[in-house]
Amino acid sequence: MEYTEIIYLINKVEGKDEIGNTIPSSFTLTKRYAKKQSIRTNEFYSAVESGITPSIEFVMKRLDYEGQKELNYKDKRYSVIRTIDPKNKFDIVLVCTRKIGVNGDNISG
């Protein structure tokens, strides 16, 4: 399997505001290589039943993923809505949905 697409995993650093609420204060981007693939039909329909519309999947090395909930791909922000463990124990599949109207949508690495 060739990992030819570049994605940037977003690591959020949380801080506290003046009254003690947890707020995102900054983030770092981690460059990783992945393989882009289409959403499988059964994955799409089960997500839509839950009110979520998956738009893309990425396969990447399991050791490179640390549970990040967001990523950037081609200057677009995506949320990781689910991970799948394929039969290959070295990879992980990230099922993602496009985030629209997010501040900092066009962050780049």
Image (tube, helix red, strand yellow):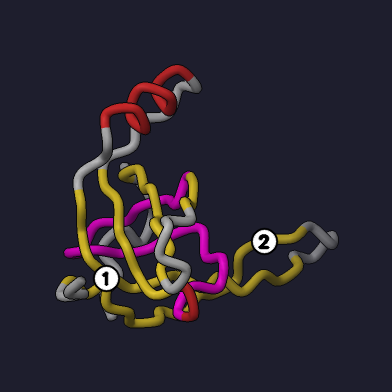
In the picture, which quadrant includes the C terminus? bottom left
**In the structure shown, which secondary structural element does the residue marked by tag 1 occupy?**
strand
CA–CA distance between discs 1 and 2?
A: 30 Å
Q: Residue at x 45, y 22 (%)?
A: 51
Q: Which residue is mark 1?
A: 34
Residue type, numbered disc 1? Ala
Task: Kindly identify which numbered label has been placed on residue 60.
Answer: none
Q: Position of residue 54 (x, y in %)?
A: 33, 37
Q: Which residue in the rendered view is the most extreme toward the front? A: 87
**In the structure shown, which secondary structural element does the residue marked by tag 2 occupy?**
strand
Residue type, numbered disc 2? Ile
Assess disc 1: are there few (<14), some (14-19) or many (≥20) residues with their C-alpha within 10 Å of its C-alpha. Answer: many
Front-most of residues 87 and 70: 87
Q: Residue at x 30, y 59 (%)?
A: 58
In the picture, which quadrant includes the N terminus? bottom left
Q: Is residue 48 left or right of residue 63?
A: left
Compared with residue 14, is residue 50 higher up or lower down, i.e. above or below? above
Compared with residue 108, is residue 48 higher up or lower down, i.e. above or below? above
Q: Which residue in the rendered view is the most extreme toward the top? A: 49
Compared with residue 88, is residue 55 higher up or lower down, i.e. above or below? above
Answer with mark 1 or mark 2, whichever residue precedes in sequence.
Answer: 2
Query: Which portion, as a residue range, is magenta?
Result: 64-81
Residue 70 in which image quadrant: bottom left
Q: Which residue is mark 2?
A: 23
Q: Which residue in the rendered view is the most extreme toward the right? A: 20
Residue 67 drawn in magenta? yes
Residue 93 drawn in magenta? no
Q: Is residue 29 left or right of residue 107?
A: right
Q: Position of residue 79 (x, y in %)?
A: 42, 50
Residue 39 in which image quadrant: top left
